[in-house]
Amino acid sequence: MKRLTLKEVQTALLGLLTEFDRVCREHGLRYSLAYGTLLGAVRHGGFIPWDDDADVLMPRPDYEKFHALAEEGKIVFPSDFALTRDRGKRVDYPFLKLMDKRYRIKSASHVEVPYLFLDIFPVDGVPDLPPKERKKLYHRERFWNFINAMCRWYVFADKWWGYVLRVPLFWFYLPWICYGKTRASRRLKKILELYPYEECELCDCRAWGQRCDDIPRALYDDLREYDFEGHKFFGYADYDTALSVCYHDYMTIPDEKHRGTHHLRVYPVPKA
């Protein structure tokens, strides 16, 4: 099966973003384009030319409502779309991924989910704690995220060296695999629930260690539409604050060697 070009991957990701945006508009849910996706909207009017993924952020109250509506069947996606689980006995991650099952993915380093996906991250409150206590809390969150990651990154896709590495790495990964990603995700969620989003002045994506320093919660009270590949998606009106803490001089195009991607290989799933 022929591998999709980067442009074709971005077109498929655009379909995921469009469906997600439609659902959020129908149910009055707040979200913002995030990280490289927001940067692409501001700097390029669409995807960063070399980017092969898409991210959105949702305030925890909207995220929980989104999850509840999906569980109740009140959110209807196309039949080829599916959501991962972020809780329960078969939890996948401490955040959601909207997948398009028409496109299977492979990676040279690890496999997260089998299909092309949009990451949907919850944004949680950042507690007003002394610096040392904040640092301890941050390390606890990173620890549970580390276990979650180790439980799935033992499989190195389809590269020959990945299978060779399984032997020496087995004993390193074994304790984390035995503990399990489900328990790790539950422990992390308990920590996140200690500091409600609505009661904190600052917030950040604490559910997957994506922190770009703390941003004012007020940014989510002022969203605007951005032109993105001929579509309209929501993002922070004050994009400068959000992008500056993540990328600093974000309008400067990085050198080619510093252009990060997921290195995904995407293939269409044959029709039955």
Image (cartoon, rainbow, N blue to C red):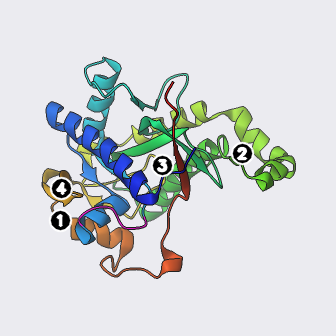
**What is the distance, in whole Å, between disc 2 and disc 4 at their CAs?**
40 Å
**Residue bearing mark 3:** 208
Q: Earlier in the sequence, mark 3 or mark 4?
A: 3
Left-right relation of 144 to 157 = left
Which residues lie in the magenta part?
45-50
**Residue bearing mark 4:** 218
Q: Amino acid at mark 3?
A: Trp
Q: Earlier in the sequence, mark 2 or mark 4?
A: 2
Camera-nearest label, 3 or 4: 3
**What is the distance, in whole Å, between disc 2 and disc 1 at their CAs?**
40 Å
Q: In this rendering, is residue 28 above or below 56?
A: above
Q: Any magenta on residue 27?
A: no
Q: Earlier in the sequence, mark 3 or mark 1?
A: 3
Percent x, y for residue 263? 55, 59
Q: Amino acid at mark 1?
A: Asp
Left-right relation of 240 to 245 = left
**Residue displayed at 76% across by 40% down:** 175
Camera-nearest label, 2 or 1: 2
**Residue displayed at 34% across by 82% down:** 252
**Residue bearing mark 2:** 154
**What is the distance, in whole Å, between disc 3 and disc 2 at their CAs?**
18 Å
Q: Earlier in the sequence, mark 4 or mark 1?
A: 4
Quarter of image, res 49: bottom left
